[in-house]
Image (spheres, grey):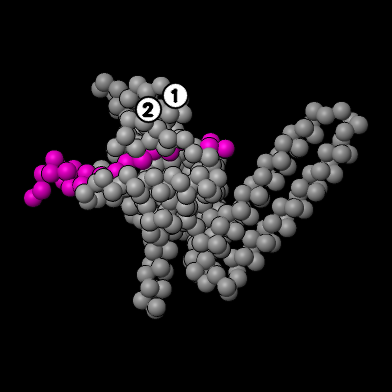
Amino acid sequence: MMSMKSANNELDKHYVHFVGIDVAKKSFVLATSLSPKTKNYDNTAQGIDQAICFIKEEHKQCDNGKTLVVLESTGGLEVPLAKAIHLAGICVMIANPRQTHQFAKSQSLTKTDNKDAKMLAFYAKMMAQRDDLATLLYCPPSQSQELLTALINRRNQFVQMCVAEKNRLEQSHHSQISSIQAHITYLTEQIHELDKQIKTHLDDDNHPDLKQTSSVIQSVKGVGTTTATLLAMLPELGTISHKQLASLVGVAPHPKQSGETKFKGLCQAGRPEVRKALYMATLVATRFDEKIKTFYQRLRANGKPFKVAIVACMHKLLTILNARVRDELQKQVVVR
């Protein structure tokens, strides 16, 4: 049997070139494991091409193995660069800023653009040793999924604006009431219009995979209204293990210890928009889905607090969805 040390050596041979990129709106800083210096590029198509050429040229110094590039999630600024790197045949990962900041803190690293890029290159080397790295690598969404994500994001923006206006309504001067109410009406109409567009997109025969997966998800009682969010924000559904998916969403229990005191808490990372949608679906499922309802009632009867029971049900519901989508994907492969 291969020892842990030799296994790590094998992993290190698999990825031998590590790149960290700190992305800003107009430029980005690139650092690699093979050079102490950083390089600056314009965040344009030309700058991205130059950076990819540099990464490929530097990789020639390595005998074997692959390159791993890590970028930090910066609200979408990193996506064009990540797409280009992926299309160039280079493995790339978009890291959660909270996790990279915790990593930097653990290494006592200060924050500057150059040092951030170097930290991300170091972070890439650490991530290369993970057995589940393949599930963390960035893969551009399909055009249909990209459109669905755009529709969901726009709907969320309108919902947030509507909530803000309703909050203002309670404390505004009477002269502003009609204006705010008119805006709320407009926002509500836009939300309904987007709901129609989302439904049309999910039912479109031109996107059979999306349509079939949507149908599978909606077969679970309570999940209907969150189908689009799960499809758009959780493309890994059905393609990775239950444990990996729970950690990805942020409903996996993570043990903590301080001295002799041990307690469990939820993963602090994850995808909050998916978690919120899953929470709402779980509330409905505890009433109408027999499996989830029975599980929830048993937990409550055993003295579990409401929040603990609901999170456990969220985990169970996610597992059920993952299994059903996985089975459907396998059927599609057999048919093809």
Q: Is residue 232 left or right of residue 95?
A: right
Determine if residue 307 is in view.
Answer: no
Q: Amino acid at mark 1?
A: Lys
Pick the residue in front: 77 or 329.
77
Distance Cα–Cα, label 2 vs label 1: 8 Å
User: x%, y% of residue 52?
Assistant: 42, 48
Identify the residue under disc 2: 104
- Residue furthest toward the left? 1
The residue that appears at 61% across and 49% down in the rendered structure is 153
Is 158 covered by the magenta stretch? no
Q: Is residue 199 left or right of residue 23?
A: right
Pick the residue in front: 183 or 305.
183
Callout 2: SS: helix
Residue 15 drawn above or below residue 112: below
Residue 111 got which mark? 1
Q: Amino acid at mark 2?
A: Ala
The residue that appears at 30% across and 47% down in the rendered structure is 59
Pick the residue in front: 116 or 64.
64
Is 13 covered by the magenta stretch? yes
User: x%, y% of residue 241?
Assistant: 34, 54
Q: Which of pointers 2 and 1 indicates the residue nearer the eye?
A: 1
Determine if residue 189 is in view.
Answer: yes
User: x%, y% of residue 200?
Assistant: 65, 66
Q: Earlier in the sequence, mark 2 or mark 1?
A: 2
How crowded pointer 1 is (Cα within 10 Å; few <14, some 14-19, many 20+) is rated as: few
Callout 1: SS: loop
In this rendering, the count of numbered labels is: 2
- Residue furthest toward the bottom? 335
The answer to whether the residue labelled 2 contacts the one labelled 1, judged by CB atoms less than 8 Å apart, is: yes
**Placement of the C terminus among the 4 image quadrants:** bottom left
How crowded pointer 2 is (Cα within 10 Å; few <14, some 14-19, many 20+) is rated as: some
Magenta range: 1-27
